[in-house]
Image (cartoon, grey):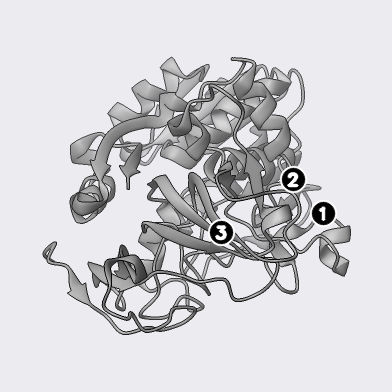
Amino acid sequence: MDNNIQLVTGSGDRRQPKGSPETTMKALVFHGPGRKSLDEVPKPVIQFPTDAIVRVTKTTICGTDLHILKGDVASCTPGRILGHEGVGVIDSVGSDVTVFKTGDHVLISCISACGRCEYCRKQMFSHCTSGGWMLGNTIDGTQAEYVRTPHADNSLYPVPKHADEEALVMLSDILPTGFECGVLNGKVQPGSSVAIVGSGPIGLAALLTAQFYSPAQIIMIDLDANRLETAKRFGATHTVNSSDGRATEAVMMLTQGQGVDTAIEAVGMPATFELCETLIAPGGTIANIGVHGTKVDLHLEYLWDRNLTITTRLVDTVSTPMLLKLVDADRLDPKRLITHHFSLDHIIDAYETFGNASKTKALKVIINT
């Protein structure tokens, strides 16, 4: 797919461009499985009084975007602008927005939350009845010059003065996801043993945040030697290259034959989830982070009597304010996850780099808009 900018008529939450530069923008558009392009599309407008329009300054690509391009996410339909992470400056706000104003510098959450519905009152913002994971999924996303953010008062965060924008992009999704879906759901405890299957960006985010709880062992498992070396630098106590098919044996040797207290699945493939099933100790927790687009077997024939907990979750971003404080206090450095930079005009190249991480050694890429 080339980088030629096309004119695409509106779909989803977009309206027809009127021909002037002020009413159109560049955006990365999904055209169906395996198809994407950088297009000229209508600039978003306020649709509801709780909306804000944000001029995106920096965004990134998520592994979930790759799952969308594989056809794993049925809710994302052709014509959608991808992306659910970023920082920017508010361009305009709806009449009911009270926390933010035009010109405010904001972090865009991957999850939109009304703050009022039954699920929001349970802090299950990902299941908000009028929000949830919308950006780059059911409405247009952040891989664009502008984005409409629903429920702005509850779905944006003020950027602290002197904060590093690139670091904060990692707080839109990847760090709260690794922390909430992996570490919190996995019940990581001081002195416990943890195996993280997948040393890509989300697995490394789980590694960074698991260290908040001082587990005795954090074992990172992957096929990629470069990513395992990165995991060592990020604080892994042990690494296991699973390319020889003996990862379970290696983990059992490291845990005196017991297995781990927490196994975190951070890939989204049947083989990696089933590996977690073989690693877990009696009484342990398997925490799923990965996006699964195909059937996974649950081997109850050898798990039925092991007192296990299996958790699933879509990130709720309830931890974002805490993570912002840690970054602002220099107690957490998300910039360590960033390996490449691109302009929006070269976002197709960014996708190629991110999607071929074994060759390019990419973790997270920053797109400057």
Name the residue nearer the viewer: 180 or 326: 326
Dot 3 or dot 1, earlier in sequence: 3
Tell how many labels: 3
| Amino acid type, callout 1 | Gln
Considering depth in this image, is 251 or 367 the residue closer to the camera? 367
Q: Quadrant of residue 320?
A: top right
Q: Quadrant of residue 331?
A: top right
**Left or right: 7, with 68 as reference point:** left
* Tag 2–tag 3 contact (CB < 8 Å): no
Residue 170 x, y percent position in the rendering: 50, 37
**Helix, strand or loop at mark 3:** strand
> In this rendering, is residue 100 above or below 147?
above
Closest to the observer, 97 or 132: 97
Q: Is residue 213 left or right of residue 61?
A: right
The residue located at (12%, 66%) in the rendering is: 4
Relative vertical location of residue 126 with respect to residue 59 in this rendering, above or below: below
- Kindly state the secondary structure of the residue where label 2 is placed: loop
Q: Which residue is mark 3?
A: 92
The alpha-carbon separation of the residues under discs 2 and 1 comes to: 7 Å
| Neighbourhood count class around disc 2 (C-alpha, 10 Å): few under 14, some 14–19, many 20 upward | some
In primary-sequence order, the first of circles 2 and 3 is 3
Q: Is residue 348 shown to the viewer in this render?
A: yes
Which residue does the numbered mark 2 point to in the structure image? 318
Give residue 123's mark: 1
The amino acid type, in three-letter code, at marker 2 is: Val
Q: Which of marks 1 and 2 precedes in the sequence?
A: 1
Percent across and percent down for residue 274 are: 53, 54
| Image marks 2 and 1: residues in contact by CB distance under 8 Å | yes
Q: Position of residue 119 (x, y in %)?
A: 83, 65
Where in the figure is residue 20, as x and y percent of width and height?
28, 73
Instruction: Tell me what residue is drawn at x 60 percent, y 64 percent.
Output: 133
Kind of residue indicated by mark 3: Ser
